[in-house]
Amino acid sequence: MAEPLASPGTGYEVLENEPPELMGRGLRVGTYLFAGGTAFFFLCFLFAFFYLRSLDNAGMWKPKGVDASIPWGTVIVALYVASALFVRLGLADHVAGRHREWRQKGVVALALGLAGLVVQAIGWSHQGFGPADGGFASVYFGWTAFLFLFVFGTMYWLETVFATSLRYRNTLTGQPAPGEASGDPDRTAHDIQDPLSLVRPGLEALSFYWTFLAGIAVLAWVLLYLV
Amino acid sequence: MSTMAVDVHPPVWRRLIGFNLLTGVILGVGGWYVGWFGAHAVVAPSLSFFGDIDFNELSLVLAYLGGVVGFLTGLGFLNYPLARLRGYPSSLREKETQGVGRYFTLCTDHKVVGIQYLWGIGLFFFIGGLNAMLIRTELLRPAHQVFPAGTYLTIVGVHGSMMMGMMTSGILGPFANYLIPLMIGARRMAFPRIEALTFWILMAAGVILQTTIFWGGFPTGWTGYEPLNIEAYQGMDCYILFFALVGISMTLLGINMIVTIVTMRAPGLTWTRLPIFAWGVLSTAILMALAAPVLVCTLSLALFDRVVQTNFFVAAQGGSSYLYENLFWVFGHPEVYILALPGFAIVLEMLPVFARKPLWGYRLAVAGLLGVSLLSWFVWQHHIFVSGINGDLRPFYMLSTELISIPTGFTFICGMMTLWRGNIRYTTPMLFCLAWFFNFLLGGLSGVFLSDVPSDVTTHGSFFSMAHFHYTIMGGLVFTFFAAIYYWVPKMTGIQLSERLGKIHFWWMFLAFNSTFAPLFAIGFLGQPRRAVTYAKSLQFLNDWVSVSAFALGLSLLFFLATFVYQLAFVKKPAEANPWASRSIEFQLPSPVPVHNFDRIPVFSSDPYGYGEGPAPSWTPAGAPAGRD
């Protein structure tokens, strides 16, 4: 008689101590897929750009005076790209075991990304045209607004990875109090064995996604500011 | 002793305090008002540099967004992100309670989420069905009789949106969430909190759609076409927010499913041993993860046009309504297969069990599922054949649309060959599967008329196309949804459903369904357009026939609901662990399945379809300590 696959008597303790590799793998694959979804999301703007540009309905694709400011756009995209670059460099430090250096680069990356968002918000009010001024203006404001939202979310993600590194910088064993993040003070064991070891895969996934998003920002810069 | 089990039972009033549905509703209402007044008091002055903003629209949109945020906060979805923001480490599970209470809160057990989905989706399916009854009531007479034309259009729109929006998760929500981890030998979904989030977002979306009636409704039907969209009352915003939230839920659900199947399969479960249901879920999830973001973006642009006066879809200002039509159908046609593919997979999963034969052409079936998933990206312009697209594009899209019948045919071939010379058991789930062959065949064949340009020019926008998609969606998805209920609910609840009542439900529904939708082909050919509240007097007999049949169809669903609730709540006949003598792994587990799924992670040695090929496979325990995957 084969051993039963499960018995009703066993409880939640079976779920504790899952090896972190599983979650790490899921994070990476999930990030690739999310990047795919993000690409399809921004493809709508790419399609809208070329479609409306080719139609030029009522001659209102880009009326006179509707030109996005190249200096503003360049500064914003440069800040995004620089932030993504610092995350990449920080990841290299983390892989090499230089955790202090990673944290330094992480905080710089966070500051640069947030600065990019602030400059973007100011930049909108200094463009000299509004969202109602034709097809290009619509694409410009729509694309940059959503890029803003996605970058904001990425900055949140960066902050969480950085904050965990910072909070447990002196913890050698990798064992924070069980249930600290789960809202369950009664929990006596981690559901992920050594949850701090997930900082690395988290950082790898973040670095990939932020680089990908910065690539979309560069594409937006070329189309919305230079073309 | 379990570390998570709650042994003490505090009084009811105490259990109501905390993060749960009640708190979610209270904070949702509060968030709605914060959004409404905040838009006027804070957002309006700070956005004055934009110029032409419609602050009534903006207030409504922010009110609903505030409501959604409040609702999710009340359920406890912000606790973990805020803890992570403060640097606390990752964890997989929320504090979980036992008993009925866990169904009304954020729960990270995939089995609880599956059952939440079953009831949640069922509720909105019921509301959508009631709308259908109202539509058929109005159409009992050729002239206006019950509703003004605008109200009628809103009812049609809510019915279509509810069915097309909520039912996208009709199979993946309840059944994939519940079963995929079991079928692949895992203890959880890849991202349990996201899994729970997809459900509660969907519920918020459903409520938002219902409130459209308070804001004038919307006249566009489920497609939200421009330029009608931008000219509509504020009720249109409810439609946009509803479908955008559905899109977000679909995207996250799709990603979660793919990651789970790709990364969490147990040892030995190679791709060629994966249950065909999991392949169907994977094919669907790919479409969800990639197509739904297009929907979210498109609807966001429509919202921008309505709120901040952008001109994406306003031709006089440099936009184009065709842009909307194109983008919508880039999502919209994959959406059709998001609805259909899980039905294919359910049929292929059940046929071997009830024919007592191995699945014929496993690899061909997988190729069919993936082929449909791929080709569905290249057919969208057949929806706008008569909207003035470039004539040179028509042949390509006609051909690509017809091409998709080839991988669809793979499913039919594999199904029919599995039945061939099988020892067929006509159980209730099997009857629903067999009905799928009949319904989907009619739906597919009538689709050829809509993919061919010459016949589409005549039938487009008529009741013919409505009959076609009801045969594919209701005949394909909803029938297999019921097959899944009768097949898997005994496993999910531990309660056996009556075969006799199930067969009464089946025959009643099958006959009423065909009596309702088959005449619509004729009505369409005779020229009755969709979404029109009046029609020619000569069509009254056929319309009355359809209405009466539709009421019978509605009653069959009420019969199901009544008997289903009665059996679950009162009869409670215990289900055997493996009532269908299935070789699939989920049926080797106790009913209902324990919280941890498996004592030890199983090791797979074959696919689950080897009927008549010796003893059932054994899932030799890996020998690793409990808790390790």
Image: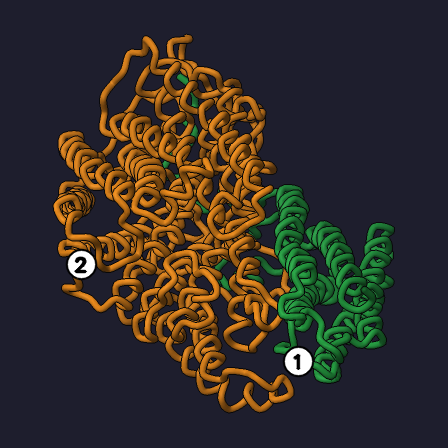
Chain colours: A green, B orange
Nearest to the observer: residue B166 or residue B153:
B153
**Mark 2 surroundings within 10 Å by alpha-carbon count, few (fewer than 14), some (14 through 19), many (20 or more):** many
Q: Which residue carries the number 1 mark?
A: A130
Same chain check for tags 1 and 2:
no
Up-down relation of residue B118 to residue B442 (above or below): below
Q: Residue at x 60, y 42 (%)?
A: B392
Up-down relation of residue B587 to residue A98 (above or below): above
Left or right: A203 as drawn, with respect to B30:
right
Residue A95 % position (x, y): 83, 50
Q: Helix or strand or loop: what does disc 1 sit on?
A: loop
Residue B291 % position (x, y): 55, 49
Left or right: B420 as drawn, with respect to A76:
left
Residue A190 % position (x, y): 57, 52
Residue B279 in view (yes/no): yes
Nearest to the observer: residue B178 or residue B283:
B283
Q: Residue at x 68, y 69 (%)?
A: A61
Q: Helix or strand or loop: what does disc 2 sit on?
A: helix
Q: Which residue carries the number 2 mark?
A: B138
Q: Say which quadrant the C terminus of chain B sits in.
A: top right
Residue B577 % position (x, y): 30, 29
Q: Which of the 4 image quadrants contains residue B623?
A: top right
Amino acid at circle 1: Gly
Left or right: B537 as drawn, with respect to B171:
left
Nearest to the observer: residue A125 or residue B255:
A125
Disc 2: host chain:
B
Nearest to the observer: residue B160 or residue B370:
B160
> What distance separates the C-alpha of mark 1 from that of mark 2?
46 Å
Residue A173 in view (yes/no): no
Q: Residue at x 73, y 64 (%)?
A: A162
